[in-house]
Each structure stands twice: as C-alpha cells, then as structure tokens.
Image (cartoon, rainbow, N blue to C red):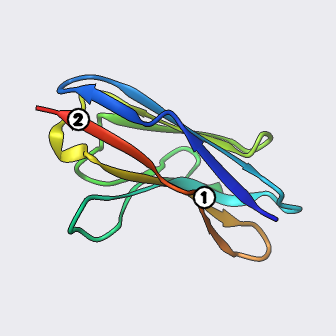
Amino acid sequence: QVQLVESGGGSVPFGGSLRLSCAASGSAFGFYGLGWYRQAPGSQRELVALSTDTSRFMPKYADSVRGRFTISKDNAKNTVDLHMTRLKPEDTAVYYCYGDEAVTRTDYWGQGTQVTVSS
C-alpha cells in the first residue's frame, strides 16, 4: 500500500527554521505531484506548497509562505521536503504530506506532523 511518512515537525521560536520531510513508498507508478498542506485549529486545510511535473521549475506556494518556504522534490526517491524559514506564529498548524499518484491520480496523505511556532 502507498504510504507517506512525515518527519521533522516540532516546536520552534518565532523567526526560526524547520525542515519537514516526507518519504512516499508503495507506489508502482511514482507521483505526479508531491507537496504539503496544513490545517490550523478551526481553519480549513490549505495548500502550502506543491511540486508537480508541470511545475518543477515553479512550484505552487501559498501567498502566505512564498519567499519563506521552499519545497524540494526528488522524483527518483519519491521524497519531498519543506524547508521553512522565518517562521511565524501564524504558521502553527498540522502539516500534511500530500501525494498525487501518477497514472491512478489517487490522492494520498501523510498522518500529519505538528509544527508550533512560539511568539
């Protein structure tokens, strides 16, 4: 079965940095897209960053994180990282790894990892 395993969450001070990692496995096709979503308490889940075959040179970023976060995807390894810098309390959320499986176009989700930014 396809699994997305996240790591790297934690608590950091305002202005700090954190790197989230996601390793996808179990897919016979690989992934058309890999990225990250987040959900804060009482808020809807929102896209943070997404890298696809058609956006490999211009990943999608939420306006709120553009310039601070960087997504990196390794298609050969089926891994995707999210490098977060200049973190703000508003970035506090559960972050979910997302995979759009190639061919099947099935959506897969990681278990979520908590990121907490203190003020």
Extreme-right residue of the structure: 28
Q: Where is residue 16 in the image (x, y as percent from the top left)?
A: 26, 22
Relative placement, left or right, of 92 versus 97 is: left
Q: Position of residue 108 (x, y in %)?
A: 63, 67
Quadrant (top left, top right, bottom left, bottom right) of the N terminus: bottom right
| Any part of residue 51 in sight | no
Give the structural element (helix, strand or loop) at label 1.
Answer: helix
Q: Where is residue 103 in the image (x, y as percent from the top left)?
A: 80, 73
Q: Which residue is drawn at 39% across and 45% down?
A: 114
Instruction: Indicate the quadrant where residue 119 lies.
Output: top left
Circle 2 or circle 1, nearest the eye: 2
Q: How many marks?
A: 2
Q: Where is residue 36 in the image (x, y as percent from the top left)?
A: 47, 53
Q: From mark 2 to mark 1, how far is it between C-alphas?
A: 32 Å
Relative placement, left or right, of 21 versus 119 is: right
Q: Which residue is drawn at 17% across and 27% down?
A: 14
19 vs 52, nearest the viewer: 19
Vertical comparison of 39 with 104: above or below:
above
Vertical comparison of 23 with 12: above or below:
below
Give the structural element (helix, strand or loop) at label 2.
Answer: strand
| Any part of residue 96 in sight | yes
Tag shown at residue 95: none
Amino acid at dot 2: Val
Q: Mark 2 points at which residue?
A: 117
Instruction: Indicate the quadrant where residue 115 lies.
Output: top left
Amino acid at dot 1: Thr
> Tag 1 or tag 2, which sits nearer the N-term?
1
Q: Which residue is drawn at 48% across and 49% down?
A: 59
Tag 1: Cα neighbours inside 10 Å, few (<14), some, or many (≥20)? few
Q: Mark 1 points at which residue?
A: 54
